[in-house]
Image (cartoon, rainbow, N blue to C red):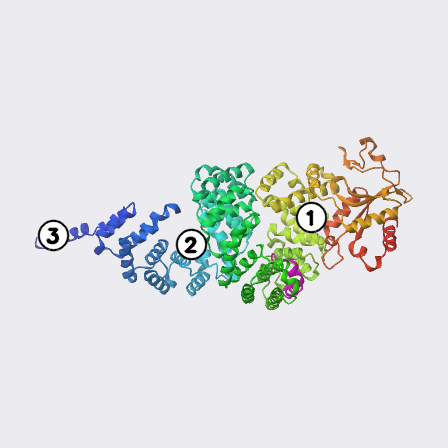
Amino acid sequence: MFRLQCVRPCLRRLLHQGVGSKDYVLEGLQVCSSEDQLFDVVGKNKTKLTVEHVSCAVRKLWDFQKERPDQLKTVHLIKRHPQFLTLRVLAENKISLMDDIALVDMLYSFVRLSVEPHDSLVQQMVSEAWRRLDSLPMSSLSKFSVSLIDQFLKTSPLMGHITNIVDQKLSSIDNGRVLAALMVSVSNLVSPRLRDALISRAECLLDTMDPLNYSTPRKMVQFLRSIKYIHRPLLEKCNKFFLRNIPRLDVEDISYILGLYQSLQFHSCDFTLAAKERLIELIDTSTDPHSFSKLFISLAPISSMEIRKSLEDTALLLADEFSANQALAVVEALEESQSRNFSLVNKIVSVIQKNLHDYRSMEVARITQALYLLHYQNPELFAALRTILVNFLQRSFYPYEVTMLTRVLSMLPSPRLEEDVVRHVDDVLTQCNLNELITISFAVAKWIRTDPSYRHSTHSKYVRLLQRLSQCGRERLQTADRLDLVLDEIKFSPGEWFEEMLLEETLVALNRMINQINPKNIADLAFFLTRTNRLHPPLMDRIASVAIEHTDKIHFSAIYPVLLLFSVLNYEPAHVEELYDACIKHFTPHICSFEPHLLVLLAYCLALVDRFPEELIREIFSIDFLGKLDCQLETLPYSTKTRTKQRLMEFNRAVCLECPEFQVPWFHERYCQHQQKKVNGSISPVQQQIHTMLGQVLGGINFVQVAVNTPYFYTIDFECKLDKHLKPLSYSGPSTLQISQRGKVLWDSKSLENAQDELPAGAHRIAIDFMGSKSFCKNSHHMKGETLMRKRHLEILGYRVVQIPHFEWNSMELSTPHAWKRYLKKKILG
């Protein structure tokens, strides 16, 4: 009994403590549904708040905000609330008591609630997290890295430390969301080795990820955009996630993804068409300026004329409510869609003018470029923009910014540039990469053409600047030791100044690094060499050998630029048959995965060298493919759309002429007729000279015809007819060439029955073509693939083809009328 009496008070005390240990403050914070309720609980319990209470309160505040759209967020009101200051003070005093996860979570929430990076709370939390960095779990390390990005510390030593940890522990990261956030955070500091490792890990984790999770793949694409690296396998995997989630994507999601794809120059016909349909569904719900501006910039450039007109009408009504950034985005979309709605342009410009003082340097440059390309007429506005651009340029020392500002300034109608501006550009040149140097050279070339003082001073400021540009470019090429970096800088470089000043030095540098050519970079190298329009056998042979040896390591879509190099420049490396066979065998299983326009370009490329894979022909001329191509063409930029249509016509013509066994119909008659109406029918002085000479050689002008249209719409410079004794036959009238329903060539507007009797027995037609410099590789007499295919096709049509190369006609040997006539007589009559 005595023992029981002793135990009874202890039990009573324990029971009392159990009931009393319930945390009513924490429960009160957890059930809050608004900021006001939460701050009320904080205010009533200031003295009782523990680390757990502060952490819960701050997390809840951010949870309230992140669930709202941007226009409804109230962060500015929270920051001014007195109880928010209470939470900040308490958090700062309790940093040492926080565990690792709570510390990072609270820092993340405070940064998201716009507490400034220089605030002592944020600085102490960052310092404490840095001290514990090696012990942080990967999920917290990921969240910490995101907080650092928000504080503009993306290239800090601390981020370097995080990058090193990611490198060491990459194989242990098994959460795609954690990996994606870390990829974006460390993107500015990754080496090529770590980049490849991150991409490989991302591909593995995507295979095990919830297909309804599209935010993680979006961050992975953002990583590729940040490092300016196109890795098609990862992009295609991410694209599949986006396609699965199209019904769940809102305007902002679609706008962001399309922007990422545009930056990476990655085309996905399936996503673009699906996004277009989804955006059309969202038109009625996008009624506020924020969501509508996102809708407009995404949908207007890829929509039909009818939808675009409706969008422009709505934009006109909402224009006054647009913010400065929304107005900028809309005017760029108007330029991209080549709008001629001047009422809307004027309205948007008025909004821009009101906010002109709020724009940063690159934004002013983008505004100026968009208005220039829209052919907007407002001299006063352009004068104001020029003044702002010059002021920004004089204060900037970032090479990319100086380059952009210089390029845009050269668009404006100003006859000259101030001496101090030229001097400032000169000061930055040593920091510029090759692409920036080339861009500045374009601007300088424009000023030379427009500045009247240049004609009176050969030692002008522009000449000195061009000399410095050449010097900096040569020094950069001579010290370059990484092929991938050089290719990245010269990817879009060919131009007059580059070809005259740096091309030879570039080819020497590329040749020096020839052993670095691998399956990942041969597409970029091949694309560059094609654009130079010159043969460089050592590099081309190396590309061919790598392509043959490592075909399976080349992405199927990269086969196009590789084969384009050899077919356009008509170069046959050793084992040329093995090269084409290996490439065709590699891409054939992926034919259905190609972007429609790219498959057309690839088919044309192969047609140049007389290769017509049956699977490729069957696919391109199927109803389903042509329907999909039509849909895609509506979404492509004008230049790409035009080139694709032209290449489809040329491939259709090549198949009809060279592969009649496939029975592909010729369906480009109306297209060619329409194109002919747009072509200027005038002939050059050299062609006029040749025409005159031909008349004298053949016995009269009635024995030769000019600019003759053949079946399948080739236009030949001159045509004549010779009988079996090689005597010229005269033309009684203009020739109208047609094709009969039975596929017979009709040379004149006579009946179908007489088609075969048009020429006397033994007679034949001669096509005489003057071949300008575009028919040959530069600095060479090597004929290009397109010229050879044309000759092949004209011979199939029954012509004997006589080609007059420009370097023969304009040679010293043919400098008299007698020599020219003798040359023509030998070419035509033998």
Query: Where residue 178 is drawn, which disc sits there?
Result: 2
| Nearer to the camera, 15 or 374 | 374
Does the image show residue 664? no
Choose the circle earlier in sequence order: 1 or 3.
3
| Nearer to the camera, 161 or 251 | 251
Q: x, y (%) of residue 71?
A: 39, 46
Choose the circle earlier in sequence order: 2 or 3.
3
The amino acid on which the numbered mark 3 sits, given as a three-letter code, is: Arg
Task: Answer few, some or many: residues within 10 Å of disc 3's Cα (few below 14, many 20 plus, some between 14 and 19).
Answer: few
SS at circle 1: helix
Relative to residue 16, is residue 418 depicted above or below? below
SS at circle 3: helix
Cα distance between the residues tagged 2 and 3? 53 Å
The amino acid on which the numbered mark 2 sits, given as a three-letter code, is: Val
Main SS class of the magenta portion in the image: helix
Cα distance between the residues tagged 1 and 2? 45 Å
Determine contact: label 1, label 3, CB under 8 Å: no
Toward which corner of the image does residue 657 lie, by quadrant? top right
The magenta segment: 491-514
Residue that badge 1 annotates? 606
Residue that badge 3 annotates? 8
| Nearer to the camera, 274 or 469 | 469
Choose the circle earlier in sequence order: 1 or 2.
2
Relative to residue 358, is residue 303 depicted above or below? above
Q: Is residue 305 magenta?
A: no
Q: x, y (%) of residue 726?
A: 90, 45
